[in-house]
Amino acid sequence: MTIKIKIRDREYQIEGEVQLTKALKHLNIPNQSVLAIRNGILLTEDEPLHSEDQIELIEVISGG
């Protein structure tokens, strides 16, 4: 079973069940630079991801 993680036009797949922070670290994505959404709900960093989850990452943009 896989977890699908999408950011912009890229899609990644991770096998097994992991916490969001570990999945982001595995993909080399700083957790402070994205918001993670599952089924329209914002996830916290320690949220467990399960097989068949589809996660959308939205990049955080800051500026002045």
Image: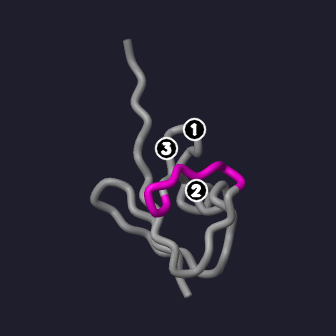
Determine the residue located farthest toward the right in the rendered image: 46
Q: Nearer the viewer, residue 39 or 18?
A: 39
Q: Residue at x 44, y 56 (%)?
A: 40
- Residue 34 got which mark? 3
43 in relation to 4, above or below:
above
The kind of residue tagged 1 is Gln
Q: Position of residue 15 (x, y in %)?
A: 58, 80
Callout 2 secondary element: helix
Q: Nearer the viewer, residue 30 or 19?
A: 19
Callout 3 secondary element: strand
Check disc 1: other Cα within 10 Å, few if <14, some if 14-19, many if 20+: few
Question: Circle 2 sits on which residue?
Answer: 24
Q: Residue at x 46, y 63 (%)?
A: 39
35 in relation to 21, above or below:
above
Callout 1 secondary element: helix
The kind of residue tagged 3 is Val
Question: Circle 1 sits on which residue?
Answer: 32
Q: Position of residue 54 (x, y in %)?
A: 46, 70
| Mark 2–mark 3 CB contact (< 8 Å) | yes
- Queried whether the magenta region covers residue 41, the answer comes back as yes
- Residue 20 got which mark? none
Q: Residue at x 53, y 49 (%)?
A: 42
Check disc 3: other Cα within 10 Å, few if <14, some if 14-19, many if 20+: some
- Queried whether the magenta region covers residue 26, the answer comes back as no
Tell which circle, 2 or 3, labels the residue nearer the N-terminal end.
2
Q: Residue at x 64, y 49 (%)?
A: 44
Task: Give the extent of the magenta segment.
Answer: 38-46
Q: Quadrant of the N terminus?
A: bottom right
Spatial CA span between label 3 and label 1: 6 Å
